[in-house]
Image (tube, grey):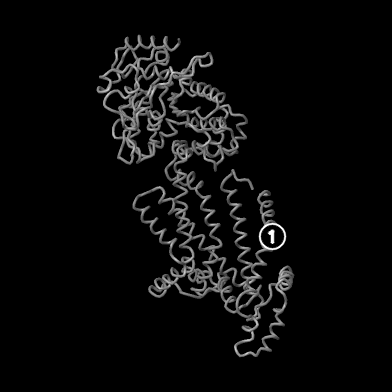
Amino acid sequence: MALLEVDDLHVTVTTEDGPASVIDGVSLRVDAGETVCLVGESGSGKSVTAMSVLRLNPEPAFAYPRGAIRVAGVDTLRMPARQLRATRGGTVAMVFQDPTTSLNPAHRIGDQIVEAIRAHQDMSRADARRRALEVLTDVAIAEPGRRLDQYPHQLSGGMRQRVLIAMALACRPRLLIADEPTTALDVTTQARILQLLRELGAKYELALLLVTHDLGVVAQMADRVLVMYAGRIVEAAASRDLFYDPLMPYTDGLLNSRPRGVADGGGLTPIPGAPPRLGDWGAGCRFAPRCRLAEARCRTEPPALTAADGGHLRACLLDVDDVRARRLVHRQAAAR
Amino acid sequence: MATVLRFVGRRLLQTVPVVVIMSFVVFAVTSLLPGDAARSVAGEGASQEQVDRIREQLGLDDNVFVRYVSWCGRLLRGDLGTSLTSGQSVREMLAIAVPVTAELALLAILVALLIGLPAGALTATRRAGWIDTAVSGLALVGVSMPWFWLGLLLVLGLSLGLPWFPASGYTAFTTDPVDNLTHMVLPTLTVAVGLLALVLRQTRAALLNVMSEDYMRTATAKGLSRGRVVVRHGLRNALMPVVTVVGLQAGALLGGAVITETVFGLPGLGRMLVNGIFSRDYPVIQGAVLVIVLAVLAVNVVTDVLYAALDPRVQL
């Protein structure tokens, strides 16, 4: 059984003109021990999808009209409050984007970790404090004993992200959802945090759902990759397949817009245009207005997510071999 | 603890110039009051000679600076002078009046916080629901209502209408605590309502701000109950602006006490000041105002210490 199984998730958000769809039929699964990356531009719905798992999108502004999110078989969208609390931080833990604002400035580091532990385990304060010291040691923070009694503002951003990871791992979750965990950090700190996540993933036998817009992070971390665009998953593949053989023009565009080889004189090739506004998605393929391969039918006929090659899924009406051929031509032209 | 004491010591030293300036302003302003103390001491039918003699006895002929310096000299020895009308020492009068006003102010702050904080939290978490609308509406009424009018309404309703609480009079807490508190109910409510409404509105606004902070999401994601998230993580961080408001209101609170004590016949600082002004009793006015100035300054120091206690990022 999958550890996490999102099935036809629909999420809406209340706007001035009534509810608008932000997530439109997303399905995904994460098995025990694997690392899955969810990539996409800002506004593609990747964070909302991740937050939905523990129902952390602010309600009632956000609503879940259809779909299910099963954690170890039980739907979090229909869980009683008590069970949802037990799942949050228990089976599934989360790490967020900005470590500088994600810790409460008024409480000591140790107290915040102890609180997380005691929310799930019947443990004395002293035992919980010992466990807190243990996880702080696990995340390789310098002088873990001293950190317990410090306040968040006394720690650097990288250290705070380590604290947040320690807090997430304190109750030995089976799935860790990390929403852009390195975006707010400088590059060297980013690399160390990713390294730490990999090591801890192995040590704690964690499944990892990593939300990111950074394809470099994806390449380092992912077993499987899901690409989101305008509230839908448009391509899903093993990491290697996705990087070497992107079968959806949007994914190809993302890969080309990486600053790879800029130092050698190669330029960036950005995707023209901007993602559609919330809910303003048209009838056909949502990427069609920006797609250089788009045909007339792309604008009227919505593509379904279907298997192209073994486990490689994509939502595109164009012929697979045609996409491959034109990708090659385009890359050669760009290289010249 | 040592840092706190050092901070308080430093702050008290800083207040010395303020106290000196304020005391002179008070002294000068009382001297400029229209009316003649000597005449009011001498009585209606006194002759001009009698009045002049009394004026000389009281030292009112001297230049204002001379009188200020001699007043300061006596002040430093703990002598605040004697009332021109009753001949009672101002220090003794203050010893009776200050506890009454202090009790009134503390009770009002206590009531305002005990009701205002939870009610503010409740409205913030049920934003735009009927509870929020009703309570916020009431709070607006509470902020807008003049103190004297509310006091009169309370007397009409809860003392004359329903004879639950006495409308006036005072018993010292040390003499009879129960009788003391029954007498304090209406005055406390009168002073508390405005402050309560302010605390409530401030708590609601601050908490609504804090609710969207990232650490609130972290707290929820840890698996804490909604109540614990709101109180331990939300309210704790929302307290700062509330403390500011209560601190700033300390002066207004003492002003409100003047009116309230007059309405309810409480022998406090406010009534002492009002009586002093009506009878041009300079030493009494000066003593009372000096105490009020000191109280407001003390509240400021306490507020700063509370800031540091609430927010570890604040250095004393």
User: Splitting the image into 4 quarters, where does residue A252 fall?
Assistant: top left
- Residue A136: percent from the left, percent from the top? 56, 30
In the image, residue A51 above or below residue B107: above
**Residue B36 versus residue A103: which sits nearer the camera?**
B36
Relative to B52, is A249 on the left or the right? left
Residue B127 on image: x %, y %: 38, 48
Q: Is residue B261 above or below residue B222?
A: below
Between A42 and A212, the one lying in front of the other is A42
Tag count? 1
- Residues A331 and B139: in front is A331
User: What secondary structure is found at the residue carrying circle 1?
Assistant: helix
Q: Which subunit holds the residue at mark 1?
A: B
Left or right for A165, reference B91: left
The x and y percentages for residue B63 are: 72, 74
* Badge 1 amino acid: Pro
Q: Is residue A33 visible?
A: no
Above or below, B242 against B259 in this view is above
Front-most of B264 and A228?
Answer: A228
Q: Residue at x 47, y 47 (%)?
A: B231
Compared with A223, A99 (above or below) is below
Residue at the spot x=43%, y=54% of the render? B119
The residue indicated by pointer 1 is: B17
Q: Is residue A286 visible?
A: yes
Dot 1, how many residues are within 10 Å of its Cα: few (below 14), some (14-19), or many (20+)?
Answer: few
Residue A281 x %, y % = 30, 29
In the visual, does B58 lie left or right of B168?
A: right
Residue at the spot 66% in from the left edge and 66% down from the top edge: B23
